[in-house]
């Protein structure tokens, strides 16, 4: 308290993940892809539903990975963009009879704009302050959705029920299976797009900002533009996930998009490995299935069991699932010799 | 005009709750440079322990002091056992740890004491304060105790070696180690103090909001907001921040037509973000100069 | 020749007997029911903001344990499968799909929470699985035409609010009403019922203060209502906030006519923590007996309930309204399943549920009966008003029906 100002050497808040290590090798990617395509043909509709949710949350976590792992901005507010995307799709489908597939790009664009606009004032904030600002956004969203002013469109506290689409062209598959493959296609598109984004010049700009903002700016990177761009892209992708979520769950309500969702997405990113895109889906699996496992172990202490399992995971793999992947790659390399 | 004064006074009384919590938040921030999500839950658990003691017949002030000591020890223990191993891990992983801790404490409290509300006594009584119908003696006592803790913290950080050592360990750990400060134990100490202050906050808040496992959820959000508004490096700022948030929130709810009532929290948070954009270190925090 | 005839006759008789035997013992099952077991699905918030209601699920589990110990229903044991949805609609959707598609339950019984139930209503009706005796008072569950598989149980919030409106119109026709309400489906449903009940006198409501569950304390709302000069304070609140309101009213020495919604009328859950001395004269309405009220200690129905608690759910607190609730609604389900006999198809379960005539579970107030019909999916519609005196509620007045127009 004696110094007039506090001089801080900004250590790295988010660890640098080299570009190459952000994805998996082609071999593993192909194997996973084949699994994702083939498995639904053999399981019950309920499992297909869970797999669809896995993909959807995976996309949302991916978006967060781009924002935090890519450009180093901390966000606890993704649930707000997810909600905007979900409601956009729901309102367009239910009130304006727009085809469900069309609602997704609209949701994405709308959320991109929202994220970009939010990113502007957020420029002045970083670290814990940015976290608080995004936290504020996430807490505000359910209240905004309940506002009487919007009730005519949003259905207020009662929410909106959304119809699930049938498979087109009379294809012989259940609604669940059709929705799964539809989601899978979009997920692959988003994933490939994100990988390309991070490998591009913009991606390099993001990572430069993440690693050392001051140095990046003195090297000519337009920090303001790229930071807000990162927010926008991340929000847009989350919005698409939200739209898919609305269709899969067939219901939107303010209570579905609370801070709990934002925290879950954050946990998914950490467990999967910050900055490691494939980890998004591992993280997503964690947040969907581990609470169920915890409930199975002990109904009364499900929260405690979840907490303990989470601690186990972060003790064993502080850097997330990426660590296992690295170990796996090292083992594979040793075998090849 | 009367409504205005009423709302200001009511704002001060809810603000006292936020101020109390904000103080604990600042404390932990001073120690570990981070916000601990589980702070509220630890405070809640401590309050339950004190309640349980009183159920067993222990008098109020004895339970109060014992809880303070137990919380201090528990804070250190949690840090040593759960977070020291994560010291080398990325910060985000630590945050995940806070969330896990939150989950565990909340769930255990729910199992042990269930989720129905319990009455919690106050040592200050509940009659109107100085005849005022808006602030009760309890709330006046709460404000007084908060200010007392604030003074204590101020002296601790400003005038004691330990306080200086803790601050050094948090902001410039390498340099601190070079001068012989055991930074690791400073962090543990910080956790212990934060837990103790948190327990006081919990024991002051419970009489107003009623004791139950989920009682701190709303308070924590406001506590964070107040701490950030006041400046995370300034306990004094935290307390002022708490009162400001309380007053502002009430005024918004009363005077902004239509949406004011429904958007109290978002608007309060928006205010804080606006302040941060203008003064990134908070109202009373010291400006932070970043070096490459 | 004669012997042949005799043998033929014997054979014919035997065959006839066999055929008629199977005709009499015709059992019909849908998924989830068998000769030995009936699977009942349930969704409750065991974690998250509404976890206080988890007690209902635990009480129901204990009640079915009791029924099983006493021989089950027509010889079949109940398997009660209850999942946690943390009061989150997407989680509720996931859990209900698990119950129906993975656990293959016969019915989904007493799922809790309006948002969760709204989320699963279309799915259950589409799959033709009964969504029976939902644990929410929202008015929209009584809609057999559009949702023939969904049925409520407790009196709807709107019918309760209409009863209060009637009371105020009679007792205090010049009242200035102030309403503190929770800003969600529960609060808004009540508010609507109040306004409908007051009809063209709805302008008696001078001030409405909505609050969010994320607010730590509602004290400032109470202060605002007092400043608005109202003399009737209607508290549409959940237990924690109801208690805070009672306490604040006492602290600022304000004594309007204070009406509290039935949801928060629990002596153990609300009034005791808030302070008995602060709660004198508060009004509410009830449809069930209060576990805290010694006047029911010798009532045969309540005795059964208290014995049940002691034996099967010793951790349960008789003062907590949730235990009384869980017992009553579980007893209603058991009655319906018993009425089904050996026809345990989902359609028959709904049919029997829609044919309850003057059924009185152990825990309902004397005079309040459950009645349903194919056009009336609201089992309980009656309430009696009560005033808090000393340490318990004093019932007064007639049993009122919350139907519009009465």
Image (spheres, coloured by chain):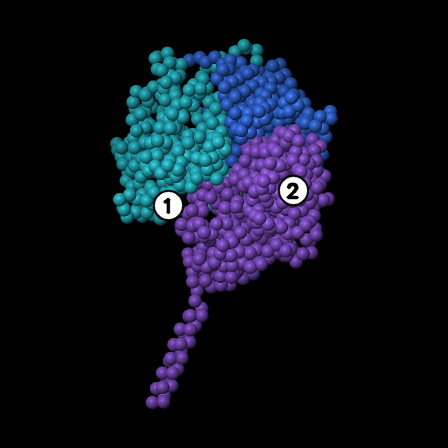
Chain colours: A cyan, B blue, C purple
Q: Nearer the viewer, residue B288 or A306?
A: B288
Quarter occupied by the C terminus of chain A: top left
Graded by Cα atoms within 10 Å as few (under 14), some (14 to 19) or many (20 or more), the crowding at tag 2 reads: some
Could one spot residue C315 in this view of the protein? no
Left or right of residue C386: residue A41: left
Residue at the (56%, 19%) spot, across then down: B230
Q: Does residue C209 lie above or below B176 as drawn?
A: below
Q: Chain of mark 2?
A: C
Q: Which residue is mark 1?
A: A47
Image mark for residue B24: none
Q: At which x and y percent is residue B291? A: 44, 12
Q: At which x and y percent is residue C303? A: 65, 56
Residue at the (31%, 43%) spot, across then down: A178
Cα–Cα gap, marks 1 and 2: 54 Å
Q: Does residue C206 lie above or below C315 as drawn?
A: above
1 vs 2, front mark: 2
Quarter occupied by the N terminus of chain A: top right
Q: Does residue A148 lie above or below C138 as drawn?
A: above
**Mark 1 residue element:** helix
Q: Which residue is mark 2?
A: C168
The image quarter in which residue B229 lies:
top right
């Amino acid at each position: 308290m004696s110094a007039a100002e506090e001089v801080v050497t900004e250590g790295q808040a988010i660890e640098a993940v080299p570009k190459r290590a952000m994805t998996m090798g082609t071999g593993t990617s192909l194997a996973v892809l084949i699994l994702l395509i083939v498995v639904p043909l053999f399981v019950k509709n309920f499992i297909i539903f869970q797999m669809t949710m896995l993909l959807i949350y995976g996309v949302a976590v991916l978006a967060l990975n781009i924002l935090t792992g890519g450009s180093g901005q901390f966000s606890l507010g993704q649930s707000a963009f997810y909600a905007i995307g979900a409601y956009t799709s729901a309102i367009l489908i239910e009130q304006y009879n727009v085809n469900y597939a069309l609602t997704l790009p609209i949701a994405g664009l709308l959320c991109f704009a929202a994220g970009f606009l939010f990113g502007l004032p957020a420029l002045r904030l970083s670290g814990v302050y940015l976290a608080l600002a995004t936290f504020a956004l996430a807490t505000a969203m359910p209240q905004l959705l309940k506002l009487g002013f919007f009730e005519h469109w949003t259905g207020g506290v009662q929410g909106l029920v959304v119809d699930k689409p049938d498979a087109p062209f009379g294809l012989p598959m259940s609604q669940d299976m059709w929705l799964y493959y539809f989601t899978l296609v979009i997920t692959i598109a988003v994933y490939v797009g994100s990988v390309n984004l991070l490998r591009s010049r913009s991606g390099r700009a993001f990572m430069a900002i993440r690693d050392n903002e001051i140095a990046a700016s003195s090297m000519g990177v337009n920090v303001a533009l790229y930071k807000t761009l990162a927010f926008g892209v991340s929000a847009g992708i989350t919005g698409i996930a939200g739209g898919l979520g609305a269709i899969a769950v067939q219901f939107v309500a303010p209570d579905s998009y609370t801070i709990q969702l934002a925290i879950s997405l954050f946990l998914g990113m950490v467990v999967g490995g910050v900055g490691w895109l494939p980890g998004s889906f591992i993280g997503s699996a964690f947040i969907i299935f581990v609470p169920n496992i915890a409930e199975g172990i002990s109904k009364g202490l499900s929260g405690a069991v979840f907490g303990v399992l989470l601690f186990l995971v972060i003790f064993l793999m502080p850097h997330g699932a990426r660590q296992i992947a690295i170990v796996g790659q090292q083992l594979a390399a040793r075998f090849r010799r | 005009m009367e409504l205005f004064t009423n709302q200001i006074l009511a704002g001060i009384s809810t603000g006292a709750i936020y101020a109390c919590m904000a103080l604990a938040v600042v404390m932990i921030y001073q120690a570990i440079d981070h916000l601990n999500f589980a702070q509220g839950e630890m405070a809640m658990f401590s309050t339950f322990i004190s309640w349980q003691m009183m159920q067993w017949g222990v008098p109020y002030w004895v339970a109060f002091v014992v809880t303070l000591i137990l919380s201090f020890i528990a804070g250190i223990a949690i840090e040593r056992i759960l977070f020291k191993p994560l010291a080398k891990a990325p910060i985000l992983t630590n945050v995940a740890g806070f969330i896990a801790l939150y989950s565990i404490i909340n769930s255990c409290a729910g199992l042990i004491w269930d989720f129905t509300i319990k009455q919690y006594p106050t040592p200050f009584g509940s009659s109107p304060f100085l005849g005022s119908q808006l602030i009760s003696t309890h709330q006046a006592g709460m404000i007084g105790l908060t200010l007392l803790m604030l003074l204590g913290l101020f002296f601790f950080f400003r005038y004691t070696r330990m306080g200086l050592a803790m601050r050094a360990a948090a902001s410039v750990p390498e340099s601190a180690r070079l001068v012989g400060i055991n930074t690791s134990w400073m962090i543990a100490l910080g956790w212990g103090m934060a837990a103790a202050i948190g327990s006081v906050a919990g024991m002051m808040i419970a009489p107003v909001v009623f004791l139950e496992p989920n009682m701190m959820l709303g308070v924590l959000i406001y506590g964070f907001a107040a701490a950030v508004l006041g400046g995370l490096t300034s306990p004094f700022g935290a307390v002022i921040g708490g009162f400001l948030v309380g007053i502002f929130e009430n005024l918004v709810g009363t005077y902004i037509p239509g949406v004011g009532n429904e958007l109290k929290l978002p608007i309060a948070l928006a205010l804080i973000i606006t302040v941060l954009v203008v003064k990134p270190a908070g109202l009373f925090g010291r400006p932070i100069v970043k070096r490459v | 020749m004669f012997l042949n005839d005799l043998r033929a006759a014997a054979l014919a008789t035997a065959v006839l007997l066999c055929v008629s035997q199977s005709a009499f013992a015709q059992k019909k099952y849908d998924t989830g029911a068998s000769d030995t077991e009936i699977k009942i699905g349930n969704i409750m918030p065991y974690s998250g903001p509404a976890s206080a209601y988890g007690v209902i699920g635990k009480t129901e589990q204990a009640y079915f344990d009791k029924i099983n110990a006493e021989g089950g229903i027509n010889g079949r044991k109940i398997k009660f499968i209850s999942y946690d949805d943390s009061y989150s609609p997407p989680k509720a959707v996931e859990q209900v799909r698990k119950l129906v598609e993975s656990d293959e339950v016969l019915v989904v019984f007493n799922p809790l929470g309006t948002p969760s139930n709204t989320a699963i209503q279309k799915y259950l009706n589409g799959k033709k699985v009964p969504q029976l005796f939902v644990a929410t008072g929202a008015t929209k569950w009584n809609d057999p035409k559009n949702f023939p598989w969904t049925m409520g149980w407790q009196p709807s919030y709107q019918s309760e609010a209409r009863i209060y409106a009637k009371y105020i119109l009679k007792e205090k026709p010049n009242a200035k009403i102030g309403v503190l309400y929770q800003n969600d489906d529960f609060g808004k449903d009540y508010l609507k019922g109040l306004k409908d009940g007051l009809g063209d006198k709805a302008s008696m409501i001078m001030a409405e203060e909505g609050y969010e569950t994320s607010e730590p304390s509602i004290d400032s709302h109470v202060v605002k209502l007092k400043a608005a000069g109202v003399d009737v304070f209607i508290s549409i609140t959940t237990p924690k906030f109801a208690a805070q309101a009672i306490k604040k009213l006492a602290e600022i020495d304000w004594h309007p006519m204070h009406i509290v919604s039935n949801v928060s009328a629990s002596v153990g859950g609300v009034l005791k923590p808030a302070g008995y001395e602060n709660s004198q004269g508060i009004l509410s309405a009830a449809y069930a007996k209060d576990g805290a009220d010694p006047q029911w200690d010798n009532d045969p129905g309540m005795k059964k309930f208290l014995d049940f608690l002691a034996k099967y759910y010793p951790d349960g607190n008789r003062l907590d309204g949730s235990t009384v609730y869980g017992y009553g609604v579980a007893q209603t389900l058991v009655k319906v399943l018993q009425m089904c006999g050996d026809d345990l198809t989902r359609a028959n379960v709904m049919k029997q549920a829609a044919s309850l005539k003057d059924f009185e579970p152990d825990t309902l107030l004397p005079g309040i009966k459950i009645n349903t019909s194919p056009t009336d999916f609201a089992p309980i519609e009656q309430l009696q008003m009560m005033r808090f005196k000393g340490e318990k509620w004093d019932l007064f007045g007639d049993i009122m029906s919350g139907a519009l127009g009465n």
